[in-house]
Image: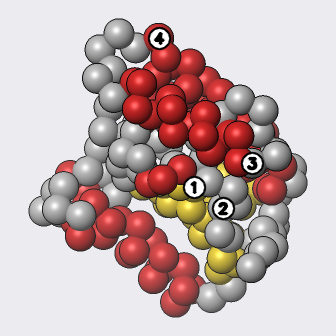
Amino acid sequence: MKRKTYSEELNFVTLTVVDWLDIFTRRMYGDFVIKNLTYCQQNKGLRIYAYVIMTNHLHLIVKSKTNNLPDILRDFKTFTSKELVKLIERNSNESRKRWMLKIFKEHGKQNKLNQNHQFWQNGNHPVALFSNKVIQQKIDYIHDNPVKAGFVDHPENYHYSSANPLSPLQVNV
């Protein structure tokens, strides 16, 4: 089912790595995602209100008033897909390199939208957030994700989360 992303409204979106590969267990890959989300904030009008980067997916509450949100998300995924694959290829310490690159290539061959590889699953599963109750539910869900996964005891202790006051990504208030 294809869902519409509303640029002017808050949206809960999920970006997932193909086959749910645990890519973001390595800090360098998570930092790269943060760097590119920051770029989208500063240069494309992306407004991020809550986020978490898990090992194989990320959740965002976002909107855009200056640009088309689906285009921003598409461009983000296209760029980061190519660059994350390059980072993996060049990382001499990446013990999972051959295995991951093989999976990305296999998915790329199966998807006519890609030429060489596919890093992110298609779509971003947008959910338009039209009430304060639903917004708070999604924020709680995002912030509780690392706790439920057993990574931390408290949401504010997870590095890649807007629940963390020392988060590497600044969010809109």
Q: Is residue 156 left or right of residue 31?
A: left
Given this view, does label 4 or label 1 mark the residue nearer the observer? Answer: 4
Instruction: Indicate the secondary structure of the residue bearing disc 3.
Output: loop
Q: Which residue is mark 3?
A: 111
From the top left corner, tell me how far across and down residue 79 is, in percent.
70, 31
Q: For marks 2 and 3, give the one nearer the viewer.
A: 3
Tell me how far mark 4 sits from mark 3, CA to CA.
24 Å
Q: Extreme left residue here?
A: 153
Q: Earlier in the sequence, mark 4 or mark 3?
A: 4
Tag 1: residue type?
Leu
Residues at marks 2 and 3, CA–CA distance in whole angstroms: 16 Å
Q: Which residue position is annotated with label 2?
A: 124
* Amino acid type assigned to the residue bearing label 3 in the image: Asn
Which residue position holds label 1? 15
Q: Position of residue 164 (x, y in %)?
A: 31, 51
Quadrant for residue 2, please give it. Answer: bottom right
* Secondary structure at numbered mark 4: helix
Residue at the disc numbered 4: 90
| Contact flag, marks 2 and 3 (Cβ < 8 Å) | no
Helix, strand or loop at label 1? It is strand
